[in-house]
Image: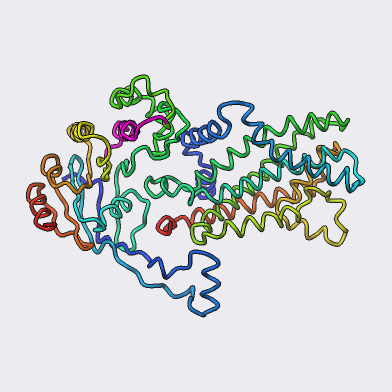
Amino acid sequence: MKLIYQALFDYFCFGKKFLVYNMVSRNIKSKYDRSFIGLGWTLLSPMMLALIYYIVFKKIMHVQMEHYLAFILSGVLPWAFFSQCVMEGMDSIVGNAGLVSKIPIPLQALTFVNALTNLITLSASIPILVIISASQGIPLGWHTLLVFYFYIVLFLVAYGLALVLSIGLVLFRDLRHVMTLLMQIWFFGTPVVYSFAMIPEQYRIVIHLNPVADAISGLHTIFTDGVTPGIKTLAVSGIWALIFTLVGIAFMRKRFLGILEKL
Amino acid sequence: MTEPVIEVKNLTKSFDHWLDQPHSFKNLLTRLSKGKWNPFVVGKQYTVLNDVSFDIYPGEFVGIMGRNGAGKSTLLKLISGIYTPTRGTIETRSIIAPLIELGAGFHPDLSGYENIFLNAAILGFGKKATEAILPAILEFSELGEQIHKPVRNYSSGMMARLGFSVAINLAAPVLLVDEILAVGDAGFQAKCLAKIDEMHRSGRTIVLITHDPNAIERHCSRCIVIENCEKVYDGNARDGAEYYKKLVM
């Protein structure tokens, strides 16, 4: 029991609150240039992407789906967060080589700080999603708060994965290119621009093996159907968050030793 | 007899040869296709430190000298826990603040003031400890009103001054100082050394790495010389400095 507590304590950097606070605020200040407009700037690129998908799928290809704008935004914004979290988090050891090879600092803190910074950016997307979906007449209510559940699931999956990849990148420097490719494949393998219901019946079981598929389709359900996502969606996404947290903890405890010599 | 704060026993450190390891998938694939790389065979190793032992007691001012590549910095990284020993043990019985690089993690867009907190947090200190020493940092750095300017506009000397002020004022009982004094003008260097001296007098333990035998002679109480991966001298500072001068001549 104590061991579990200690592992979680280290993994979520509870002992390093001052460090995490300072590094997150450094990231936010430098990224957003100390202004709220700056935050919008970061959301601008996924929103442009969403707009492009909207035009292509809705206006040109005439996809038969109601509230397609709300649908596409509630998929693309979280995905953009997830992919940025993974890609930036992967660089958290190699990109900070000058720091980590000189100062003893818990390595997971850097990945954690990155994921947390991105989570804060992502939370700025909530008002956008709420406004868009309310303007389309989708009922929002208490169940809308489940958005936080799915965001935290995405956060945990991204954090665990980024931690493993950050070690991988030290050993294999071209992992970056491999991951750029894989993230593109992953994007189309996830119900982001299409809905879970569009997937043929026989493949749906496979889609559950995609760690972020259920979280994103849960967000779709909240913002386009305006109902509580099914218990299966909640459970499967929760299990994936748990799995990635355990994998992250295992890697943190085993693989961080000696990794800095390979930098 | 007091217990040593740092106890290094039969410390050996070796690294894998860089060329023996694949560093990319591309490289891995070409090697596998040529049958040249077996992941289960450990490649050649080279030794950086070989069977080094010493104890450092509270209140000592120890200088560590050695030529470039002798293993001084590796030793410091081992003590501060960045590297793990290949063989042997290092026991530390106190909080150790490594001053291996000044201004680690400084962000150019933040002001000097904000960077103080960031830097202190990176060095492992909390909010209270940082706020307590804030006046001392501001005074020592001599930056005045400039402290609220972004660090991007600082000269490298100013940056070093700020970094040093943060690191030296943090209340760690043991300081590991690696050749950080190579930056800044002569006046600032003298001031840094004087400050380190003052810290030593107030009861802290200092481990200083330098190439300068004169600094060792002037400040240290003890000196360790490392040559060819091994400890070749451990004793009083004056003889150590002489020994080192003869060694490099």
Question: Could you say which is closer to the camera, residue A133 or residue B191?
Answer: B191
> Where residue B44 sits in the image (x, y, percent)?
36, 72
Span highlighted in magenta in the image: B153-175
Quarter in which the C terminus of chain A is drawn: bottom left
Residue B229 shown left or right of residue B104 in the figure: left
> Where residue B225 sits in the image (x, y, percent)?
17, 55
Magenta-drawn stretch contains B160: yes
Residue A163 shown left or right of residue B179 in the figure: right
In the depicted structure, whether residue A250 falls above or below residue A9: below
> Where residue B230 sits in the image (x, y, percent)?
20, 62
Q: Give the residue at x 87% y 43%.
A: A58
Question: Could you say which is closer to the camera, residue A251 or residue B225?
Answer: B225
In the depicted structure, whether residue A95 falls above or below residue A21: below
Q: Quadrant of residue A150?
A: top right
Residue B206 shown left or right of residue A44 in the figure: left
Q: Quadrant of residue A124?
A: top right
Question: Could you say which is closer to the camera, residue A201 or residue B36?
Answer: B36
The secondary structure that most of the magenta stretch takes on is: helix
